[in-house]
């Protein structure tokens, strides 16, 4: 391995010697390199976030019956006003969440519910939870705070998200080939317990309205799992770069995606991934 490294590094040695010990040349070198990553950051991240027009469900979805509402007097204290505004925002998000679940319950397919407030992920059919699991930890995009500050978060959450693409380190529907015994005697002789699949779980869901859900297992991956994870991460990076390149080739800014990363127990993650059908719907609570 060391010999291979020396062979690969050999063409660059004259350049390294040229920079070694000369601080002025080193500074010029880094100044020439800096514009490239800076340009990529501006084109792929900063401008899309700043100029992105957030896709919202129809405004009618959020219209509520106000005939029996009583208008309360606004507080005069600034702290009370801020507390009231925060409370209203929380209630609006709660209302949007239940509206999305209500719409999702009208279908016959399995749906996904992610409740970050209660740290729960659930599979539902007709509003009835079929399996629930605990979220061990999670992270989410700071761009969601931008959406909240603009007052658009409740509109963004008011209808179910629809699954469009997925990428995983494990097959969606595993197939195991077992040779059938010729008779009952051979069946008794070969009577052994079928071992369960032991595979690491990492997957990504891409929903409409620029939402990406990344799920990782809690357990430390095996050596084989690390190799699979490396290939999985490479595919994710390639897909992101290709989408950005396609947008730039069409003279449009790449779409900024909101992401949420979840960490689940491996068995829970595997069961949820394989149970969720294509074009599945998601109700999200932040």
Image: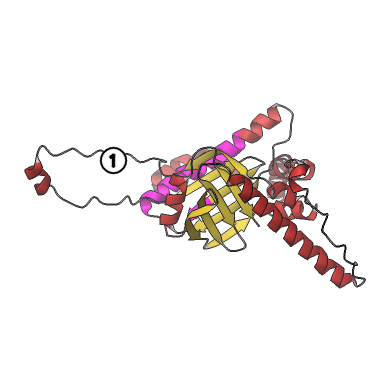
**Residue 162 in sight in this render:** yes
Residue 138, above or below 175: below
With 190 as the anchor, is 91 left or right in this view?
A: right
How is this picture coloured?
secondary structure
On the image, which quarter does residue 41 sit in? top right
With 22 as the anchor, is 169 left or right in this view?
A: left
**Quarter occupied by the C terminus:** bottom right
Q: Give the percent coordinates (x, y) of residue 83.
A: 81, 69
Q: Which residue is mark 1?
A: 176
Residue 283, above or below 136: above
Q: Residue furthest left?
A: 185
Camera-nearest residue between 4 and 222: 222
Q: Give the percent coordinates (x, y) of residue 160.
A: 63, 45
On the image, which quarter does residue 187 sit in? top left
The boundaries of the magenta stretch are 215-242
With 122 as the anchor, is 146 left or right in this view?
A: right
Q: Residue furthest top?
A: 250
Camera-nearest residue between 66 and 89: 66
Camera-nearest residue between 149 and 224: 149
Residue 225 within the segment the image draws in magenta:
yes
Residue at 62%, 44% in the rendered image = 161
**Residue 17 in sight in this render:** no
Q: Give the percent coordinates (x, y) of residue 282.
A: 59, 47
Residue 125 within the segment the image draws in magenta:
no
- The total number of labels drawn is 1
Residue at 54%, 56% in the rendered image = 262
Dot 1, how many residues are within 10 Å of its Cα: few (below 14), some (14-19), or many (20+)?
few
């Amino acid at each position: 391995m060391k010999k291979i490294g020396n062979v690969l590094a050999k063409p660059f040695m004259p350049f390294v010697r040229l920079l070694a010990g000369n601080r002025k040349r080193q500074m010029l070198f880094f100044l020439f390199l800096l514009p490239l990553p800076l340009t990529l950051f501006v084109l792929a991240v900063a401008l899309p976030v700043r100029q992105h027009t957030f896709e919202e469900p129809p405004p009618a979805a959020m219209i509520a019956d106000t005939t029996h509402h009583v208008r309360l007097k606004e507080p005069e204290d600034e702290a009370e006003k801020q507390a009231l505004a925060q409370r209203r925002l929380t209630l609006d998000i709660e209302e949007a969440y239940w509206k999305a679940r209500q719409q999702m319950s009208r279908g016959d397919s399995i749906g996904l519910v992610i409740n970050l407030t209660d740290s729960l992920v659930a599979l539902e059919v007709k509003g009835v939870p079929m399996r629930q699991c605990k979220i061990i930890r999670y992270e989410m995009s700071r761009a969601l705070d931008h959406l909240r500050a603009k007052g658009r978060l409740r509109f963004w959450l008011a209808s179910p998200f629809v699954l469009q693409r997925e990428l995983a380190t494990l097959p969606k529907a595993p197939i195991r080939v077992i040779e059938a015994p010729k008779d009952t005697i051979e069946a008794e002789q070969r009577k052994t317990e079928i071992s369960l699949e032991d595979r690491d779980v990492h997957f990504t869901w891409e929903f409409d309205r620029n939402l990406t859900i990344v799920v990782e297992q809690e357990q430390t991956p095996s050596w084989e799992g690390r190799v699979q994870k490396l290939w999985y991460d490479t595919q994710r990076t390639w897909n992101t770069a290709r989408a950005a390149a396609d947008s730039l080739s069409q003279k449009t800014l790449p779409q900024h995606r909101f992401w949420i990363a979840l960490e689940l127990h491996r068995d829970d993650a595997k069961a949820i991934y394989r149970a969720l059908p294509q074009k599945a719907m998601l109700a999200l609570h932040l």
